[in-house]
Amino acid sequence: MDTKRELVDLLLEDAREDTETMARQLGRSQAEVEEMLDELEAEGSIVGYQAVVDWSKVDEDHVTAEVELNLELDRDTTYAQVARRITKFDEVTALHLVSGDYDFDVTVEAESMRAVSMFVSEQIAPIPEVTQTVTHFVMKTYKNRGLELTDRDDDDRLSVSP
Amino acid sequence: MKLSDRAASTPPSGIRRFFELAEEMDDVISLGVGEPDFSAPWKARAAAIHSLERGRTSYTTNRGMYDLRAAISEHVTRYDLDYGPDEEILVTTGASEAVDLALRAVVDPGDTVAIQSPAYISYGPGVRFSGGDPLPVSTRAENDFVLTYDDLERAGAADAEALMICYPNNPTGATATADELAEIATFAREHDLTVLSDEIYAALTYEGEHTSIATLPDMRERTVVFNGFSKAYAMTGLRLGYALGPAEAIDAMNRIHQYTMLSAPTTAQYAALEALRSCDDDVADMRNQYDRRRRFVISRFRDMGLDCFEATGAFYAFPEAPYDDEQFAEDLLHDQGVALVPGRVFGEEGHGHLRVSYATGMTALKEALNRIEAFLDAR
């Protein structure tokens, strides 16, 4: 595996890891790792570093919804143009063009179910190309970005073993 | 109650004492654990669950489920090993049972079994349980703990009946190249030794490819290879291993196995079958993580001024202790709450070293090494 890819793996595991520790793990110098990080950021391969949050423990009112959107495009409008418009809203935390029965899968986050409903009905539904919206409220999150949010295993190994 | 001389004369393992010391304390970070910190791949666990749901709780054939033996036969071709599922593979209750069966199958009372040292703690007692006499053969740090022809000659291994080796090695983390194994093979052929080769850490080889001594010229017929699912697939508690060898050796081992274990745990066999079929990516991911931790641990020890050779397999570093290894391990445990295993536990030749397992997450590993550094700085 090339070192840059390994560095990405390390960041996916823990983006807060210090560069000295990562350098030791990769068998490179700290300066080399910092240079690789700069390159990954400059080329847009790494676009940010965020926490994975279990919202049920931080803010009980926080609501996530997955919204299906159907679109009807005219000859002058593209998916990218509509997507650009939707991504600008702070409430939209993810947007994917998907195959299947609908076109866009939009993740909407807000501080209440009413806020999500109002956002979808007042900001998304009126977009001229949007023909239908179906909102699925997330009831509970069990896994997010590769991390299990429940039933985390404790280390129950013996303290010393062969 | 009268106990047999064999049982009464077997001392408790040196690991046991450190386990008890560590258990008495709170806030211990243990680098003394010889097992993965990962759980078995979920697909393998799911297969075990499904087998139970379907009520597959009967014995299997003594040698193990045929499908599993066939999958093992296919799996080991990646190490250029060629063993047929019908007569040359035996599924056992952990690789430890395979080692025990092989010793009982090849050792007669009074036979000498040469064992590279330092070594996994069970080999010596295993030889004694089979009625034989263990002969430790020192490996040396300057040879990266790889056994040489000279080591064997110097120790008097020419008179032994069998030779036990383990690469990648517990406790040193050493691996052996094909050329290095060729020296050992030459000695074995010249002195007609049976070779018992524990390759349980084969999948955890970080530099180069794992080579089995059984693939060297004329070695297949005098070698029994042990492997299993504990280390590579993080399945220690499922207790599943296997032996590969010539049909007559496997048949002899199976005759003992059928009167003792009867068959390996059925549930574990289903998990193992699924592990071989679909968990290569999980193994690769765990290996990559161990490899990164390995580099981290070795470089930290070297920066602390502790001499540490480049361990290239298993999940152990084997640095030199700054003073008496047992005293150091005990002092460190009491002062900083970090558990390591003194090298002498693995034989006299381990004196002066420490076994440090990096089968522990990076957060704990970093904290443990910071504590070791603080301990050294305060001296």
Image (cartoon, coloured by chain):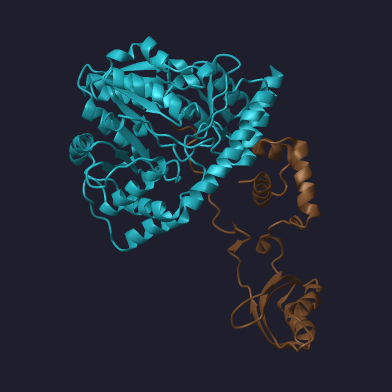
Chain colours: A brown, B cyan
Where residue B373 sits, quadrant-wise, is top right
At horizontal 35% and vertical 24% (from top left) the residue drawn is B185
As rendered, which of B374 and B90 lies closer to the eye? Answer: B90
As rendered, which of B220 and A72 lies closer to the eye? Answer: B220
Looking at the image, residue B5 sits to the left or right of residue B338; the answer is left
Of the 4 image quadrants, the one containing the N terminus of chain B is top left
Of the 4 image quadrants, the one containing the C terminus of chain B is top right
Across the whole image, how many numbered discs are drawn on residues?
A: 0
Looking at the image, residue B100 sits to the left or right of residue B41; the answer is left
At horizontal 80% and vertical 74% (from top left) the residue drawn is A89
Where residue B340 sits, quadrant-wise, is top right
Res B10 visible: no
Looking at the image, residue B85 sits to the left or right of residue B78; the answer is left
Residue B230 on image: x %, y %: 41, 42
Residue B291 on image: x %, y %: 57, 38
Give the answer, above or below, for where B189 lies relative to B365: above
Res B331 visible: yes
Residue B44 on image: x %, y %: 42, 54
Where residue B92 sits, quadrant-wise, is top left
Outermost residue on the front side: it is B217
At horizontal 73% and vertical 47% (from top left) the residue drawn is A16
As rendered, which of B321 and B112 lies closer to the eye? Answer: B112
Residue A72 on image: x %, y %: 71, 88
